[in-house]
Amino acid sequence: MVTTVHPLKILVVDDKQVIHDFFDITLGYYGHHITVVHDPCEATEIVQQREFDIAFLDMVMPGKNGIEVLKDLKAVRPHLPVVMMSGYSIQEQRDEAVHLGACGCLKKPFEIEDIRRIIRVAIGREI
């Protein structure tokens, strides 16, 4: 594992294990702290308890959709950069997410370079 001088605290909210594995393998390898939440209803509770540098949030999940979770997260931590993710073409929801404060959207499947670019834009840090 390569260690980073100032590791990021990254929250990933997605019901798919493959997304969790992707973040753990790619960003965890560099020493960043990845917190994974499978259940969207748990995301707000985690954000109330802990500070994160950035959150990645799936738009389509069972129980609660990404827009609802985004509203909840922004109510608790208005300055938390949140990146929406989706494997579907749902432009209207993406527009609403940006209007509600999401700092960007990633279309699944994505690559590590996509993550690096959006982190650089969202929080001004290289990973």
Image (cartoon, rainbow, N blue to C red):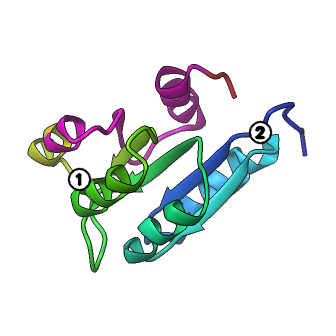
- Mark 1 surroundings within 10 Å by alpha-carbon count, few (fewer than 14), some (14 through 19), many (20 or more): few
Q: Is residue 50 visible?
A: yes
> Mark 1 and mark 2: span between their CA atoms?
31 Å
Q: Position of residue 96 (x, y in %)?
A: 14, 43
In the displayed image of the protein, which residue is found farthest to the left? 92
Quarter of the image where the C terminus is located: top right
- Mark 2 surroundings within 10 Å by alpha-carbon count, few (fewer than 14), some (14 through 19), many (20 or more): some
Report helix, strand or loop for mark 1: loop
Report helix, strand or loop for mark 2: loop
Residue at 54% from the left image edge and 70% from the top image edge: 17
Q: Answer with the quarter of the image where residue 116 lies.
A: top right
Q: Position of residue 31 (x, y in %)?
A: 82, 45
Q: Which residue is mark 1?
A: 88
Amino acid type, mark 1? Tyr
Residue at 67% from the left image edge and 22% from the top image edge: 126
Q: Which residue is mark 2?
A: 7
Residue 8: which numbered mark, if any?
none
Residue at 41% from the left image edge and 43% from the top image edge: 82
Tell me, yes or no, whether the highlighted magenta stretch contains residue 112. Answer: yes
Amino acid type, mark 2? Pro
Q: Nearer the viewer, mark 1 or mark 2?
A: 2
Q: Position of residue 22 (x, y in %)?
A: 61, 54
Say whether residue 84 is left or right of residue 11. left
Tell me, yes or no, whether the highlighted magenta stretch contains residue 22. Answer: no
Say whether residue 115 is left or right of residue 91. right
Which segment did they paint magenta?
A: 96-124
Q: Is residue 18 visible?
A: no
